[in-house]
């Protein structure tokens, strides 16, 4: 890493702290470095991860689950349901037993969601699973084989479920809660970090991060 003020040894040690999911505060205390130094390097790590994740983007095929989620604290006056309010809407596309891709979106309308889906999911080789949100109405008309889940009637019956993507949302929110609030301008980097960790679950993250960073 150019212009580093830490020795290679200490930089690798800080990267180890990051891969082990220590917060910047915990890493700074353990390594006896300034909190701002740890914050700065953690920010660089997340930027490299985000660049890596975008470079790994590829077409999905097979059994694919799609869903949206909202991030940020609710405030009085915010809309409920699929209304955005002050929260950040994110769409997730997940291949069952595989990887996930996330993208921050301005809203959850069909006009927003369909171009993302058509860009990232193969039509001829995919089974699409979503909930009953009306923005997914155009999937069949666009040539996809589409299964809609009604949670009130058939939760996880046979293969008709979106448990995978819903589990991913829970995973991301658990990861983010430990930071006690993430600035909106940095949310994208934390989101891509969670995506990276999820997609590489079971692997040696430290070794992967050494190559990426």
Image: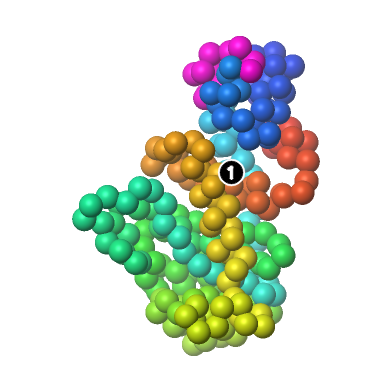
Which residue is located at x 71 percent, y 36 percent?
A: 209
Q: Is residue 206 above or below residue 35?
A: below
Where does the image place residue 128, in percent across and percent down from the top left? 59, 78
Residue range in magenta is 30-40
Q: In this view, does 206 lie above or below 63?
A: above
Where does the image place residue 103, in percent across and percent down from the top left? 50, 56
Identify the residue position indicated by label 1 in the image.
Answer: 193
Which residue is located at x 60 percent, y 68 percent?
A: 163
Which residue is located at x 65 percent, y 51 percent?
A: 198
Q: Front-most of 178 and 118? A: 178
Where does the image place residue 146, in percent across and percent down from the top left? 56, 83
Q: Front-most of 131 and 105? A: 131
- Name the outermost residue toward the bottom: 141
Q: In this view, does 191 lie to the left or right of 202?
A: left
Question: Is 164 one of the magenta-colored residues?
Answer: no
Where does the image place residue 151, in percent across and percent down from the top left? 50, 78
The answer to whether one can see residue 58 in this image is: yes
């Amino acid at each position: 890493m150019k212009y580093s003020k830490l020795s290679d040894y200490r930089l690798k040690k800080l990267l180890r702290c990051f891969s082990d999911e220590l917060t910047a505060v915990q890493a700074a205390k353990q390594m006896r470095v300034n909190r701002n130094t740890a914050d700065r390097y953690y920010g660089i790590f997340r930027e490299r991860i985000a660049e890596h994740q975008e470079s790994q983007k590829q077409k999905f095929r097979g059994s694919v689950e799609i869903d949206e989620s909202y991030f940020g604290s609710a405030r009085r006056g915010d809309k409920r349901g699929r209304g955005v309010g002050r929260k950040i809407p994110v769409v997730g596309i997940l291949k069952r037993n595989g990887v996930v891709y996330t993208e921050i979106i301005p809203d959850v309308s069909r006009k927003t969601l369909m171009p993302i889906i058509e860009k990232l999911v193969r039509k001829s080789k995919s089974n699409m699973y979503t909930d009953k949100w009306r923005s997914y109405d155009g999937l069949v008309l666009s040539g996809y084989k589409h299964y809609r889940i009604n949670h009130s009637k058939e939760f996880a019956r046979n293969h008709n479920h979106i448990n995978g993507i819903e589990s991913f949302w829970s995973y991301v929110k658990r990861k983010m809660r430990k930071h006690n609030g993430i600035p909106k301008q940095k949310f994208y980097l934390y989101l891509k970090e969670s995506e990276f960790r999820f997609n590489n679950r079971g692997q040696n993250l430290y070794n992967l991060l050494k190559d990426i960073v």
